[in-house]
Image (cartoon, rainbow, N blue to C red):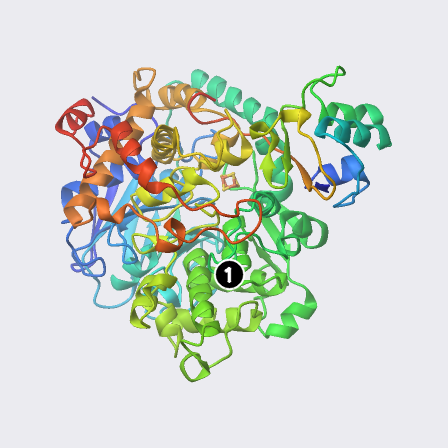
Amino acid sequence: MTLQGGFTGTILRVDLTRGSVEKEAIREDWAREFVGGRGIAVRYLHEEVDPQVDPLSPDNKLIFATGPLTGTNASCGARYMVITKGPLTGAVTTSNSGGRFAPELKFAGYDMILFEGRSERPVYLWIQDEIAELRDASHLWGKGVFETEDTIRRESGLPDCAVSAIGPAGENLVRYAAIVNEKYRAAGRSGVGAVMGSKNLKAIAVRGTGAVRVADPVATMRSQWAMKHELTQAPLTAEGLPAYGTLALMNVINEHGALPTRNYRDSQFENAEDISGEELAETRLAANKACFACTIACGRVSRISEEGVGRYGVSCSPRNWRHATEGPEYENAWSLGADCGISDFDAILKSNWMCNDLGMDPISLGATIAAAMELYEAGVIDESVTGIPMPFGSGEALLTMTEKAAYRDGFGDQIAEGSKIMGERLGHPEVFMGVKGQEFPAYDPRALQGMGLGYATSNRGACHLRAYTVAVEVVGEPEPMDPRAAEGKGAVTKAFQDTSTAVDATGLCLFLTFGTTLESIHPILKAVTGFDLADNELLQAGERIWNLERLWNLRAGLTAADDTLPKRMLKDAIRGGPAQGEVSRLPEMLPDYYRERGWTEEGHPTAEKLAELGLG
Amino acid sequence: MRLLAGLRDRLAGGSHALEVDASSVRDLLTRLVGESPDFRAAEELVFESATRDRAARDLRILVNGRSVQFLAGLDTNLQSNDTVTLHLTGARGYPGG
Ligand code: SF4
């Protein structure tokens, strides 16, 4: 079999210990079975990395993977994924980012980069079409993402190159450090940036002048136009996301009584309107912004007020938007806002901006600060520990701890560990609100039962992007499901997980699924790759990848006992608002989910299921 | 009642919240359309057709945070001090969608 399109056919293998960069052919059989992106990279991880490996040791590998539709003109063909063992979770992690870094990598001629070992001194990988070499990064070490990107662009003489980098948080091994490209797009979760930092790898810069070959150009054009047309017909992709971004959800989720507030102690935030998409659009929105080839453009460019700039003494670099920043996404405005009881939009925007420059996941950062605020208000810790007052609602505390966490300075050293380890060290593990070491995103699983099952069973720890049951439980599409009911959530969670995984493998953006279906993506994949795909083959590939991730996690030592939620979600009923009195009904849903998956009661894929998926 | 996002401009001259006297959700939507300056546009936004027997496909209606899809639909009765939230939405995309 020879790859006809979509794939360049070449991957880069970078041995950081030896300082070598080698080109090798991609495994074509795996490309067919696991598609690309998250799928094929997990297959490589499964083959090459011992699941018991210390995530921050040279033996862990770090994979940057594009999909076959990345860099094509299919809408949202902008994504790459970073696959490794996550230091926050000890599980497989698969973090996703957009922008234009990934298409640029394809244009240079590569589907994937696989880093192994550890460099003795800081380096970055420079790629210019067929040239791929490691360069000294000593002068960049310690610098923020923004300055790193600007410096590489200037020094390289190719200002159009795309740069993906870590900031001080990655260098200092903050457990939720991110990898950031084009300054504001991030592979955010689970600490992929810390793995990069542990390898002394500061950045990857790439300039490509080639193109992505497609097997059937006419069918590619037809099928991708059909999908674009669909996106213009669906309210969320045609209007909701362009007008309000993901932040449109703030008021909606709050009205449902599912907006976690003050470290999940409450489920409605009295000041949600002040940090909503509507407020942003009315008072601060400078522009919206799209990733490569995207016809949705959910990205925000938002103004920080002059007063806010003065108040917190952090100025935006003049090389960037003056007094403006990209974002925030709903999840970030929630974690840095409602979850910390903060309604000061300037403080939220600035902390979000700092997270991009310092290279940190705002979800885990905000949630860990919220857990610390709970302990501060309970009198478990005081200023002699934290160095500053840390009550809920304090924008000052948020900004101070954002900086201190990235540098592991003072109490920031505890915040940098994430709320699970921080809570355990302070004798209060119950303040950790998450799964498998990773903090929850912005939906209360007691109010939206399906989200609880999705969090508990996500292979990379608590995550909203693996099974977005909000679609059926809040949006009511394609069919409404009662958010309070446990019945039927096993099947729908499995279906969402497999679908999301399949989309991730193609190199497209998950937000497409708000306006189109796998049935519309399928003909594009067929036309681009030339693969003779059966009708449900893409969805089945999603299931295959999901099961392989599960097998890897089981070999890493995770068990069914890790498919759980904190006691606060299982035992403590919501105290007020529309979902008052609700707890998570995970114990009812989990056995149902395992059955739907074809797994044993202990959460192991059965031999029959593995054989069916070709994993036996 | 509370209106979210684009509905504020289209139905209430930019207001976030309105006080409306109504006995059911249907009654409330009918009044909302009746008081709107652009009657026809408001009707199209709120109801699926001029017969007004179904809410528009992309309109979500919450009574005290609970979708009327799980109550009595447009026939859901309202008490004084009930909070009704309207938002527009739409998401196909997952299996079966
Ligand atoms: S929908 Fe948003 S995140 Fe997705 S590709 Fe488009 S701009 Fe990027």
For the C terminus of chain A, the quadrant is top left
Residue shown at 58% from the left, 49% from the top: A577
Q: Between residue A462 and residue B63, name the one nearer to us.
A: B63
Is residue A71 visible in the rendered image? The answer is: yes
Residue shown at 33% from the left, 73% from the top: A426
For the N terminus of chain A, the quadrant is top left
**Side (left or right) of A578 relative to A72:** right
Residue shown at 53% from the left, 68% from the top: A392
Residue shown at 40% from the left, 81% from the top: A385
Q: Between residue A608 and residue B63, name the one nearer to us.
A: B63
| Image mark count | 1
Q: Where residue A128 sits in the image (x, y, percent)?
A: 36, 48
Examine the image and state in which quarter residue A578 appears: top right
Can you name the residue that lies furthest to the bottom here? A384
Above or below residue A156? Residue A559 is above
**Side (left or right) of A73 relative to A206:** right
Q: Between residue A344 and residue A381, name the one nearer to us.
A: A381
**Side (left or right) of A434 relative to A12:** right
Q: Where residue A114 sits in the image (x, y, percent)?
A: 24, 47
Question: Which chain is home to disc 1?
Answer: A
Examine the image and state in which quarter residue B59 appears: top right
Examine the image and state in which quarter residue B27 appears: top right
Q: Where residue A12 sits in the image (x, y, percent)?
A: 25, 45
**Side (left or right) of A256 relative to A42:** right
Q: Where residue A191 sits in the image (x, y, percent)?
A: 33, 57
- Which residue carries the number 1 mark? A262
Please name the amino acid that badge 1 sits on. Arg
